[in-house]
Image (cartoon, helix red, strand yellow):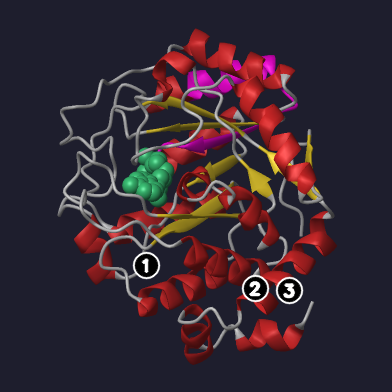
Amino acid sequence: MDTLVHDALLNKQNLKQILSTDKYDEKLFELARETALSVFGNRIYIRGLIEFTNHCKNGCYYCGINRENNNVERYRLSLDEILECCRKGDKLGFKTFVLQGGEDGYYSNARVVEMIRAIKKEFPNHALTLSIGERSYEAYKSFYDAGADRYLLRHETCTLEHYSKLHPDDMSLFNRLNCLKNLKNIGFQTGCGIMVGSPYQTIDNIVDDILYMYDFNPQMIGIGPFIAHKDTIFRDMPDGSVEMTLRILAIMRILLPHVLLPATTALGTLDKKGREKGILAGANVLMPNLSPLKDRKKYSLYNNKICTGEEAAESIEKLKKSISKIGYELVSDRGDYKD
Ligand code: SAH
């Protein structure tokens, strides 16, 4: 690892410069790629994403399934359906399941615990990741004690002024950041992250997010471009930039060499080769969709989301091929965080 570059990246002025031009991209991506190769080799971890509910009590302005959107056909998967997705994923070689959903009161803390126990009973050696938003310390602790291993909760932005332009008044940045601290203290492999190019985001905001993520030192980081959704108040806002997303991925890889860093579906949606480009800029994780085909289109966070029309097996085959073309291999491994 080039410690000089690492240290240079902790300076606000330098970060601003690197983010504001494509001049450094080639070197940046190369260094990030080498860093990832030295830690993970050419192995890419896969996570099976199960979008189990699109009901949500929150009104995040950017999100297509926010509570205000009456055009969404709402659905919930039953525990049996969720287990069926896991079985399908297990057959395809997935060793991690990610349960993601809106903040849905139907899934009380007790129901989530029941779900975790049932999945862990059938798949004791698989890792289980939750991505179900903000809950109390006690709730998180009970999820951890029931066997959940990881938790994804993007902080979205660490700047209060920016946060308030993306969320209604009944949501709180303080609470979200506090949830992240609780998750990490409890012992979850914890993931924070941002959307790149979310409305009103400035370069200074991104710089602060990069430094926040470095300080928080999470085990996972989710970074993908913002993409407008037609039924939200941000429908006419421009999509985030693929290049900027790659730059931030590369910077985080250099700053936190061991972090688990996905090349996101949103990146693959804006650019046919987005996920491959993400890997070549230091990402080491892919999260293919395992949700039932009948409900896939209903989990629409943004316009034109990819892979909503094909079986998991089909998309994983395609991914394998395109990833091997750039010299990487999808592996069947839990892919836990290691120092
Ligand atoms: N309810 C959970 C899961 C949210 S969906 C939670 O609160 O954490 C997962 C992520 O999708 C969000 O954290 C957000 O960063 C991203 N997302 C939502 N809407 C988006 C959009 N329009 N474009 C790109 N990413 C989006």
Tell me where residue 225 sits by quadrant. Answer: bottom left
Kindly report the distance in space between the C-alpha atoms of the residues bearing marks 2 and 1.
Answer: 18 Å
For residue 255, the mark is 2
Query: For ligand 1, which image quadrant applies?
Result: top left
Tell me where residue 75 sits by quadrant. Answer: top left
Kindly report the distance in space between the C-alpha atoms of the residues bearing marks 3 and 2.
Answer: 11 Å
Residue 116 highlighted magenta (yes or no) = yes
Specify the segment rendered in magenta. Answer: 113-134
Q: Residue 38: image x %, image y %? A: 84, 64
Task: Decide if residue 322 is on the left or right side of residue 311.
Answer: right
Q: Secondary structure at mark 1?
A: loop
Q: Secondary structure at mark 2?
A: helix
Kindly report the distance in space between the C-alpha atoms of the residues bearing marks 3 and 1.
Answer: 27 Å
Q: Residue 335: image x %, image y %? A: 74, 43
Task: Decide if residue 134 is on the left or right side of residue 1.
Answer: left
Disc nearer the start of the sequence (2/1) = 1
Q: Nearer the viewer, mark 3 or mark 1?
A: 3
Mark 1 nearby-residue class (10 Å; few <14, some 14–19, many ≥20): many
Q: Are marks 3 and 2 in contact (CB under 8 Å)?
A: no
For residue 158, the mark is 1
**Residue at image location 81% in from the left, 55% down from the top:** 40
Is 49 situated above or below 4? above
- Label 3 belongs to which residue? 31
- Residue 276 in view: yes
- Residue 263 in view: no
The amino acid beneath tag 3 is: Leu
Tell me where residue 301 sits by quadrant. Answer: top left
The amino acid beneath tag 2 is: Leu
